[in-house]
Amino acid sequence: MRQADVVIVGGGMVGLSLACGLAQAGFAVSVLEAGPTPMPDERIDYRVSALSRASETLLQQLGAWPLLPRKTAYRTMRVWELDGPAALSLDCATLMEPDLGHIVENHLLRLALWQRASQLGVDLQSDVHLLPMIRRVTVAELSCTTGEVWRSPLLVAADGAESWLRQQARVPLFRRDYGHWALVANVRTALPHDACARQCFTPEGPLAFLPLHESDLCSIVWSLPPARAQALCEADEADFLRALYVAFDGQLGLCQLASPRRTLPLQARLARDFVQERLVLVGDAAHTIHPLAGQGVNLGLLDVASLLRTLSACKAAGQDWGCRQWLRPFERERKWQASQYLAAMAGIQQLFALQQAPARQLRGLGMALLNHLPGWQAPLLRQALGLA
Ligand SMILES: Cc1cc2nc3c(=O)[nH]c(=O)nc-3n(C[C@H](O)[C@H](O)[C@H](O)COP(=O)(O)OP(=O)(O)OC[C@H]3O[C@@H](n4cnc5c(N)ncnc54)[C@H](O)[C@@H]3O)c2cc1C
C-alpha cells in the first residue's frame, strides 16, 4: 500500500505541471499514467501548443521551462477572412512585451515536466492500468492490475478529454460536437514565417499556421467538416498541398509536408462538477474547447495555478484538502472561466460560419474597429497573453 498526499491520474502536460507544483509545496505526490514513460525523440512533434505568458510564468516557477530544448516565440498575430473584409493584426510592441507567447511541441513539454517531476521526487508510474476506485470517508484508494494500491485524501483526474476517473465518479458531462475535425501536420513553407502566428477563417473552418523553430517550418491546425478532413488527410500529397495553398491564399507560398497528417475530432466538453468529495478534475478532464484560439492547455495550466493556491492554503491551515467544502473556491473560479471560454469559442465559430453579406460586413467592421480604435488592442492582447 502506497500512501500519498495527492494521487494524480494522468501524466499529460496538466497532470505533470500539477505534480511539480505540489511537490514544490511539500506534498507527497504520485502520478499514475496509462501510457509509457516519455522518452527523448529526435522527430519534431506535429502536436504543438501556443502557450500564453501566464503559462510560461507558471512553467518557469515549476522549473520546467528551462528544460525545454526548443520553443518558438511569436511576436505578431494575423487573423483574416478568406475573400472577406475582416482582418486583424496584433503586435507585441503594442504592449511593450517581447512576444505574444510561445509555440511548444507537446511531446517536449511533457518530457520536460516528467524530468522535472522526477527531480522533485514525485512518484511517477507509467503503463498503469487502474481498477475501479474506492472512496471512503477520509481517503480514496486506487489499485492497478499488478496489485499495487495507492491511498490518498485526494485524487485528481488529469486523464484527458475522455477521463476514465471522471467516468468512474459518474460526473455528468455537457458535450457538444463542433461538427469539425482538426487536421494537423507540420509543413515547410516557401516564404519565412517571420515569427507570426497566422489564422485564416475559410468558409469550411479556421486554418492556422503556427511558427516553429526554423524560419520555414510551421505547424498547421485546419478545422474542417469531418468528411473533408478525412479526405484531405488521405489525399495524395500534391492534392493536399494544392488545397492548403488555396485555403491559405498562398500567404506563405507553396508548402511541403514535414510530418504525417493526422485528424482529431473536436468537441466542447464541460464537466458539471469540477470537485467532489476526495476528487478534483483539471485540464481536459474538466473542459475542452475548440482549438481556434489555442487556449485548451492554457486553461488547464490556469486550473493548476488555482488548485495549487487552494491546496497550499488548506495545508497551511491544517485542513483536510480532500474535503469538497475546501475545494469549492477552486471549482467556482475555474468553472466560471471555462464556461466563458466555451461560450466565446462557440460564438466565434458561429459568427465565422455565416456566409451572408451582412455577416461578412459586420465581421469586417468589427475587426477594422479593433485594428484602428486606440485603446482596444491592449486589453485584447492582455487577454490573449493571459495577463488579464
Ligand atoms: C488540434 C488541437 C490543437 C490544440 N492547440 C492548442 C494550443 O495551441 N494551445 C493550447 O493551449 N491548447 C491547445 N489544444 C488543447 C490541448 O492540446 C489540450 O488542452 C491539452 O493537451 C490537455 O492536456 P491534459 O494534460 O489535460 O490532457 P492530455 O494531454 O489528454 O493528457 C492526459 C494524460 O492522461 C493519460 N491517461 C488517459 N487515460 C488514463 C487512465 N485511465 N489512467 C491513467 N492515465 C490516463 C494519457 O495517456 C495522457 O498522458 C489543442 C487541441 C487540439 C485538439
Image (cartoon, grey):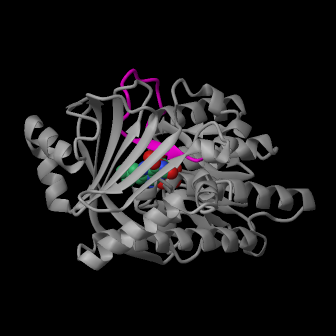
Q: Residue at point 74% right, 47% down?
A: 22
Q: Which portion, as a residue range, is magenta?
A: 36-52
The C terminus lies in quadrant? bottom right
- Residue 283 vs 40, above or below: the answer is below
Measured as percent of width and height from the top left, residue 47 is found at: 38, 41
Question: x, y (%) of residue 216?
Answer: 34, 26
- Residue 31 visible to the viewer: no
Q: Is residue 212 left or right of residue 121?
A: left
Q: Position of residue 114 (x, y in %)?
A: 58, 34
Q: Quadrant of residue 348?
A: bottom left
Residue at x 36%, y 62% (from the top left corner): 86
Residue at the extreme top of the image, as rendered: 42
Verify whether residue 254 appears in magenta.
Answer: no
- The correct choice, above or below, for 190 with respect to 387 in the image is above
Residue drawn at x 48%, y 71% as measured from the top left: 344
Q: Residue at x 69, y 42 (%)?
A: 57
The rendered magenta stretch, by its main secondary structure, is classed as loop
Instruction: Give the residue furthest to the right.
Output: 317
- Image position of 96 with respect to 292: above or below: above
Q: Is residue 107 above or below residue 3?
A: above
Q: Is residue 41 magenta?
A: yes
- Asked if residue 91 can be seen in this view, the reply is yes
Question: Which residue is at the front of the view, 190 or 336?
Answer: 190
Q: Nearer the viewer, residue 207 or 381?
A: 381
Q: Position of residue 197 (x, y in %)?
A: 43, 43
Q: Is residue 244 left or right of residue 24?
A: left
Q: In this rendering, would 187 be left or right of 237?
A: right
